Image (cartoon, rainbow, N blue to C red):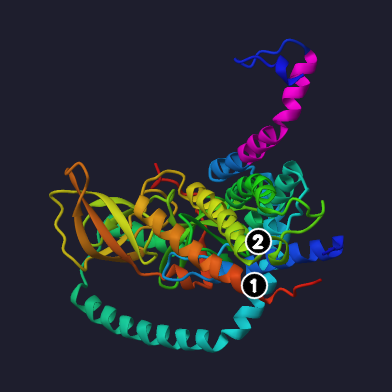
Amino acid sequence: MSSLIRPGWGFTDMQGFVDWIRKYSHWLVLVLLESISLVLLISFNNYQGSVWFAGANRIVGQVHEWQQDVFSYLSLGKVNKQLADRNLLLEQEIEVLRRELNVLKHDSTFTERTLAAKLQKAQTIPAKVIYNSITLRDNYITINKGSADGIETKMGVVCGTGLVGIVSHVTAHYSIVMSVLNSKSRISCRLRGSNYFGYLHWQGGNVLTAVLDDIPRHADFQLGDAVETSGFSNVFPPGIFVGRIIKINDSKDGLSYQLIVQLSADLANIHDVSVILKDDDTDIAS
Amino acid sequence: MIQTLPHRIGLILLIIFLQIFVFNKICLGGYAVPLMGVMILFHIPVNAGRISAMLLAFMVGLLLDAFSNTPGISAGAMVVASFVQQPLLHGMAPKDSLEDSVPNKELLGKYKYFFYMAILMAVHHGIYFLLDAFTFFNPITLLLRFVSSYALSMLFAYLLEMFRKPKA
């Protein structure tokens, strides 16, 4: 009967059609399954009701959490050392800041005061990283706090040493964070001490560096300058340290600078993070 | 060689478990990640049929995806690899082999089996990294990740196959 199938995919009768379906059913299944995979892949970031993943995450999260519990016991010694190091660093920083404060004791402007108030108002929720990937082009981090703890999508996530990412999916007890190491991540940043800002994104490859685009040609900066969040998006409060400039490139169109930034947070090795709660005050966002 | 159903399911779960808790944590030089889920496809019997092979691959892929935050990537790669698996096996297996024989070193011979593994893994890794990159935005990185991960996965697959008990 297959001879009834003419070139041009026309069928002479129903039997020909059935035969055709039977003959190529594996191709149809292939196309169907690949389409589902692609839809999952494409919709993961945009479509908040990625139900399957949210539903699965209750189980998945629990499994990852058990595993993380085992690992965190095993690495307690290392964590202790890191805490001690961090302590030392903070003590030094306090010392430096105290000295600088003495020098800079001037009347703060209205903007400075409101910003300081804003930072103080920013409340955080501590969370543990239970799954983290750095090897993909779109990396995500799973943390063990969810909507029951007050977490919503589009909240910023930081760790002790710097920026981590932005919450992208939330279930009752777990959340998925779009890591800074994700091709879709865009974070508004500025150069510390000046108001030139650009957006920070990741180009794949090295997990310790990211790219700051759209810094204007007339901006004044040099290698080693600090990069911090701008606060324009209301996801992160302004002034969170992101990293330092290690290389200056021209942008492709030659109209702006493209800066390579050494990230201060080692995202390959994070365990404890803080989620920044949004306040209802949206004047900065507008 | 006759494998019982519990044995097969156990093997599948073991490989998924290893991928999630061991291999996902390995990342050499920021590029090489062993992806061993495809090993599940190695052992699909000669006459399983393409559609059932694909459905199994899809389900395993979805499980791996859920546990690794890689929506659709493993599933897509596994399905394409399983699509290739049956015709490849039919081309390589001896004509007189039993309908439900499971491909292994004894059935195909050492070199042919290695070749069979290498092709399936290349297809799987190729699709995996293409889906992950989605566009050819950085071909050098893409190639580097593919080649290094492929080499590492083949090494692990070879070691695991070596330790698998040969049964009469």
- Residue at label 2? B39
Which numbered disc, 2 or 1, marks the residue that appears first in the sequence? 2
Label 1 is found on which chain of the structure? B
- Please tell me how crowded label 1 is: few (under 14), some (14-19), or many (20+) other residues with Cα within 10 Å: few
Left or right: where does residue A283 sit relative to residue B39? left
* Quarter of the rendering occupied by the N terminus of chain B: bottom right
Left or right: where does residue B35 sit relative to residue A259? right
Asked if residue A23 is among those painted magenta in the image, a careful observer would answer yes
Q: Quick check: A198 above or below A224?
A: above
Q: Provide residue B117's location: percent of width, then percent of height.
A: 60, 60
Between B11 and A96, which is closer to the camera in this rendering? B11
Between B36 and A282, which is closer to the camera in this rendering? B36
Q: Quick check: B129 above or below A70?
A: above
Say which element carries label 1: helix
* Extent of the magenta region: A14-36
Main SS of the magenta segment? helix
Is disc 2 in contact with disc 1, using a CB cutoff of under 8 Å? yes
